[in-house]
Amino acid sequence: MNDKIFYSSLILTLIALSLMIYLSYTQPSKEEFVEVYWQIFKSEDLIATNQVNCSVVNCSQSGFYKGNIDLNGKNFGIITTDLDKLLEYKYTCIDFNSNDTYCERTEGPFKNLDSFLISNDGYNILEVTDKNVFVAHYPKNVTQQNFTIGFVTKSYYAKTMDFKATLLVDSTQKESKTIALNSNEEIVSNFNVILPTKGLHKVQVIISPLEQKSENEIGFFVNRI
């Protein structure tokens, strides 16, 4: 009887150990995951100045902050201005044509959540302050049917892995591609979005490892006017 209990306990222990070993190989540890987030651009620290050519009448109440910002490898002059109220720097203009005159047509003034395009790349103003401007690589409002968005994928897995990046528009898959990432590596990727009709649309990017049943996603709503 005691031998029977012993062998039964031994078998159960071996089964439990086998299950634990299997799970350790097939499931990632709590520290292993993939991260995805929107590509964000930040201006350099802006410097106070009164020497700005601005096409808007009464463009500032008390002066400007001026500097530069890189957007997808292109460098542009940028200013922030307290257009409406003294010392409230809520607006920015970007010198897209590099003629050192700000706030011309299509150059602003932009405030938080305003969108603009550079060629086919869509952007959204996330935050404007006197010292910095933060811009995301996706739009919130567009007048055209298609545009490009940018996102960053970073791997926290211990080994090199392949990940599937999927683009969805209104919960329908539109495109997918495979991204190979080394441990702690991050890369910038792009998707071209096509909005079938005017109105509000939901855009999502889903990242999932090919070897694991897990995923991470980001998304935004965009209005085609």
Image (cartoon, helix red, strand yellow):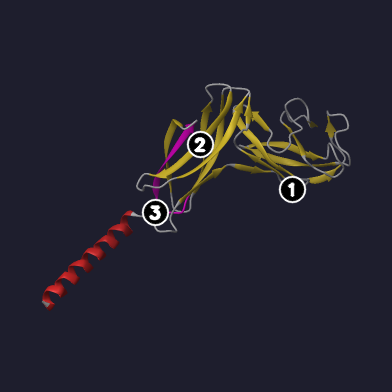
Q: Residue furthest front?
A: 1
Q: CA distance from mark 3 to mark 1?
A: 37 Å
Mark 2 residue type:
Gln
Instruction: Identify the residue position indicated by label 3 in the image.
Output: 159
222 within the magenta span = no
Q: Which sits earlier in the primary sequence, circle 2 or circle 1?
A: 1
Instruction: Identify the residue position indicated by label 2 in the image.
Output: 204
Mark 1 residue type:
Asp
Instruction: Identify the residue position indicated by label 1 in the image.
Output: 45
Image coordinates of residue 168 in percent, x first then y, are: 47, 33
Seen in the picture, residue 35 relative to 148 is either above or below; the reply is below
Quadrant in which residue 49 is drawn: top right
80 or 144: nearer the viewer = 144
17 lies left or right of 102 = left
80 or 20: nearer the viewer = 20
Question: Is label 2 or label 1 in front?
Answer: 2
Image coordinates of residue 155 in percent, x first then y, are: 46, 50
132 lies left or right of 205 = right
How many residues crowd mark 1 within 10 Å: few (<14), some (14–19), many (20+)? some
Q: Which residue does the image show at 88% across and 39% down from the upper left? A: 61
Residue 67's label in the rendered image is none
Range of the magenta residues?
155-169
Question: Is label 3 or label 2 in front?
Answer: 2
Q: Are marks 2 and 1 in contact (CB under 8 Å)?
A: no
Q: Which sits earlier in the primary sequence, circle 3 or circle 1?
A: 1
Q: Main secondary structure of the magenta part?
A: strand
Quadrant in which residue 149 is drawn: top right
Q: Which residue does the image show at 37% across and 47% down from the upper left? A: 213
Q: CA distance from mark 2 to mark 1?
A: 32 Å
Image coordinates of residue 39 in percent, x first then y, are: 58, 42
